[in-house]
Image (cartoon, rainbow, N blue to C red):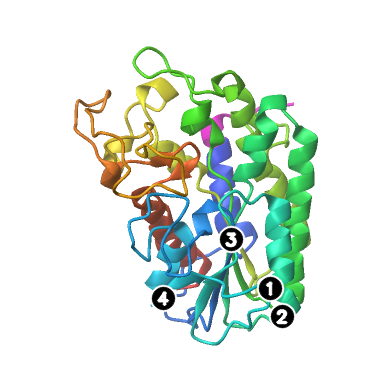
Amino acid sequence: MTKLSFSTLMRIAALMAACVLVGCGGASSTVNPLTPTRIIAFGDSFSTVDTSGYATYSVNTSETNATIASRIATTYGFTLKYRASASAVIASGTAYSYATGTATSSDTATQISTYLTYNTPGASDLFIITAGTQDIISAAPTNNTTAIATAATALTAAIQSLTNAGAQYVVVMQPINVARTPPFLALNGVRPAGTNASYNAYAQALSYDSGTACQSFSCLLSTKLNAAYPATSSHQPILLVDLMSYFNLITGTTNTGSANTFGTYGVTNPDLVVCSTAVPSCTTSTLATTSTNQYTSTSWDYTSSVFAYDYYTTPYANRLMGDYIYSYNFYRAGWR
């Protein structure tokens, strides 16, 4: 069987994300663009905010656009806040998150179930789902491919429950490359190896497939969603976003095999955590001492770093990814 190169697979993944689940073609920003009535977020740290709308599993900067989900919400003029209660009925013109920082796909399914118990999706509501990263983090030390398959199945079923209830606009963000997170990094020389560095290869394989075997979370979820939502020329309710290549670029260094690509994105610190205390207790008052970046000899601080702590990204990185989703993926899907 012919094996595809990593770059070819990334191009295929990008094409799948842009075309298969939403139909392919140019943007339709002048033809019925999405104007959300409500915005609802589910999942993990990429969507987690407090009741004020501030990011908790990041650097809490008291900003209301510091997670991926809240950044997208801000683009539409909404302030994403944590749900008022489990039984909350989400009013028109508001945006709420059910996400928790360490949520797995199973936890995300529970969040969606809770929402649906008290709410009915509207045709113009925007749903944002960020899940799978925590499943990979848990499965990597034992290379538990069965757990990953189970997680992808659970998330697919939860997404179907949303669309079966009437959701027409559901954006699903694939997990980031866990092998690029500080605990799993196994770098040479200057930077000490992470606590889970010996499992780096497993983390990478469960994040994305570099061969023909489909055992990563991203591949399994793509396959399951494509089966559940076959491509048609009509509106597709699911927009599957694969940020793997983009994330690899904003964290890319000579030690990760990408050369120093991070600088192109305004990043000065691609792999060192900036919080001296663990999230969700990290604020601008509990940051590590700013140092000189080992790759470019450039001084860095949290405002141009990727990682807040362990697997959790900074407001800057979240805004980069949120803007990419809105500017590229929403445009390609004809949602804007």
- Specify the quadrant that holds the C terminus: bottom left
Residue at 78% from the left image edge and 60% from the top image edge: 157
Q: Nearer the viewer, mark 4 or mark 2?
A: 2
Q: CA distance from mark 1 to mark 2?
A: 6 Å
Spatial CA distance of label 4 from label 3 is 19 Å
Circle 2: element type? helix
Q: Which residue is mark 4?
A: 76
Identify which residue is drawn at 29% across, 43% down: 302
For marks 4 and 3 on the same chain, the one whose residue lies earlier in the sequence: 4
**Disc 1 secondary structure class:** helix
- For the residues bearing labels 2 and 3, Cβ distance under 8 angstroms: no
User: Closer to the camera, 159 or 108?
Assistant: 108
Q: What amino acid is at disc 1?
A: Tyr
Q: Is 5 colored magenta in this rendering?
A: yes
The reply to whether residue 4 is in sight is no
Judged by depth in the image, the label closer to the viewer, 4 or 3, is: 3
